[in-house]
Amino acid sequence: MSTDISKNLITVDELAAALQAGQPLRLLDIRFDPGKGSAKSRYLEGHIPGAVYVDLPTELAGPKGSTGGNLPLPDPHAFEQVARSWGISKDSQVIVYDDTNGAPAARAAWVLRWAGITAVSLLDGGLGAWLRAKLPTSTADEAAVPGTVEVISGALRPMAAKDVATWSGTLIDARPEKAFAEGHIPRAINIPNGALVDDNGRLLPAAQIEQRLRDRGIDPHLPIAAYCGGGVASSFTVIALASLGKHVELYPGSWSDWISDPSRPIEK
C-alpha cells in the first residue's frame, strides 16, 4: 500500500516509507537563512537523497522592483521553466523541506500552488527531523530529468497592498516580535512562526494552534490574512492554519512592499 502524501504536511516516517516503496516523488531542498552561510554549500554538506536544490531568491521570486517587496512573485513563464528543471510534470507529487523553521519550504509550497501545482506536501520538522531519525543523507549535487509541467498563472490570488488596506478580517504579522514592535501594518496581530511549532520545529497539534490564536484574540472561524517581511514566514502561517481547515489569504509583498509607499500608515 502506498503512503498518502496528498496533504499539506508529511512526516519523516511517511516520507521514508514512500521512498522505500519506490513512490515517484520530486523532493525540493530550499535553504534561505543568510546568517547560516552559503545555502548551496549547506545543501552539498548533506540533504535527503534525490532532493534537488532550490535557490529561493532567484527561483521562488522575481527581480526586485519598485513594488512587490523584496521577494516579488516570479514571472509565470520563467517559473514554468524553473519548475520543469526540478523535474516537475503534471502528475508529480512534490515534497518540500528546508533546514530552518519551515518557512522557506512553505514559500515553495505556496508559489507552486499559485502556479497550479497542487500536489505539494511540506516535510514536518524539515531536514532536522530527518537527521534526528538517523535517516540517510547525500552530498551529491542532484539534477532532475526535466519535467513537462505547464504553469497555470494565478491559481491562487495573492493580496496586494490595496487589498490589505481595505481588509476587514484579521491580519496576522508573522515576523519576530522585535520587528513587529518597530513597525507594522495597522490592526495587525503578531504571531511569529515560533508560536506555531514545538521545540523541534514540528507543527503543533491543531487544537493547540487554535488556542494560540484565541489567546491573541483571533477567532479562527473568521477571515484571516497574513504577511511578514518578504512573503516567506507568512507562507508558513498559511500552511499552519490549513491544519485547522482554514484558508488564509497571503500578502506576498508583505512589509517590504507596504513600506515602499511612504503614504501608507504604520503602527508601532
Image: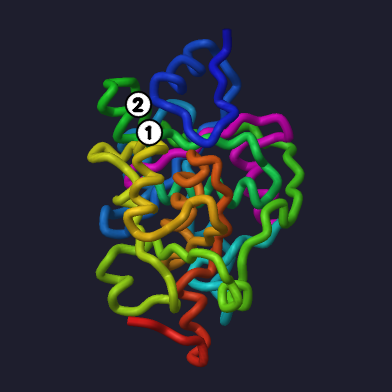
Q: Give x and y (percent) for residue 258.
A: 50, 78
Q: Which mark is residue 47?
A: 1
Above/below status of 40 relative to 94: below
Residue range highlighted in magenta: 78-101
The answer to whether any part of residue 222 appears in the image is yes
Residue at image point 63% right, 46% down: 113
Considering every residue shown, the one lying at the far top of the view is 1
Q: Quadrant of the N terminus?
A: top right
Side of 192 where 141 appears, left or right: right
Give the residue drawn at x 45%, y 50%.
236
Q: Residue furthest bottom?
A: 263
- Mark 1, other Cα within 10 Å: few <14 / some 14–19 / many ≥20: many
The residue carrying pointer 2 sits among few (fewer than 14), some (14 to 19) or many (20 or more) residues within 10 Å by Cα, namely some
Q: Which residue: 65% across, 52% down?
A: 114
Rendered position, 139 above or below 234 = above
Q: How many marks?
A: 2
Residue 201 lies in the magenta stretch: no
* Residue 130 drawn at (x, y percent): 33, 28
Amino acid type, callout 1: His
Q: Looking at the image, which is closer to me, 181 or 229?
A: 181
Q: Quadrant of the C terminus?
A: bottom left
Q: Nearer the viewer, residue 180 or 15?
A: 180
Disc sitting over residue 137 in the figure:
2
Contact, mark 1 vs mark 2 (Cβ under 8 Å): yes
Whole-percent x, y for residue 160 in the image:
61, 71
- Tell me the distance, in whole angstroms, between the alpha carbons under discs 1 and 2: 5 Å
Can you tell which mark lies on residue 223?
Answer: none
Identity, as a three-letter code, of the amino acid under mark 2: Thr
**Percent position of residue 11, x then y:** 42, 26
Q: Is residue 143 visible?
A: no
The secondary element bearing badge 2 is classed as loop
